[in-house]
Amino acid sequence: MEIKGRDIATESYRVTLGVDGREVAALVPERLAASCMTLGSRPSHQTAYVWIAANKTRIEAAITALARGVRRPRPPFDEITLIEDH
């Protein structure tokens, strides 16, 4: 999984992951990382990157499940969405 940066419009981090021989892009909402912070505050980039790294396996499983269409990920990872690359 590779983090491609923050998407300001969606307040999410863009990530890519190889799934079944293709690159899949997804949005991981920064509010997931904010869940371990003070209510109402936005996580710093460092906090978000640390949270993403700590939850890498679950994020990758959620993206893989979404890409394959096999099941809906469990909360809070059900908030991750796939995006089309243009």
Image: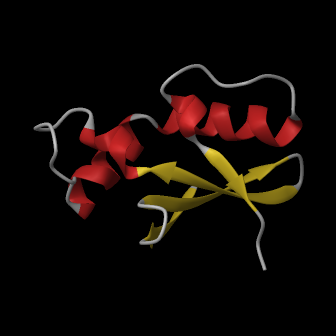
- From the viewer's side, name the closer residue of 18 and 86: 86
Snapshot colouring? secondary structure
Q: Residue 46: horizontal and vertical position, in percent?
A: 23, 59
Quarter-of-image position of residue 31: top left
Q: Residue at x 59, y 19 (%)?
A: 74
Q: In the displayed image of the protein, which residue is found farthest to the left?
A: 38
Q: x%, y% of residue 78?
A: 59, 30
Rendered location of residue 41, percent (x, y): 15, 49
Residue 48: x percent and y percent? 30, 52
Q: Quadrant of residue 21?
A: bottom right
The residue nearer to you, when weighing 52 against 9, is 9
Left or right of 79 in this view: 5: left
| Residue at the far bottom in the pictured view | 86
Identity of the residue drawn at 65% across and 47% down: 81
Q: Is residue 67 above or below residue 14?
A: above
In this rendering, the answer to whether 22 lies above or below 61 is: below
For the image, the number of numbered tags is 0
Q: Quadrant of the C terminus?
A: bottom right
At horizontal 88% and vertical 46% (from top left) the residue drawn is 20
Give the left or right position of residue 4, taking residue 68 as reference.
left
Residue under the point 45% across and 58% down: 12
Q: Is residue 82 left or right of residue 11?
A: right
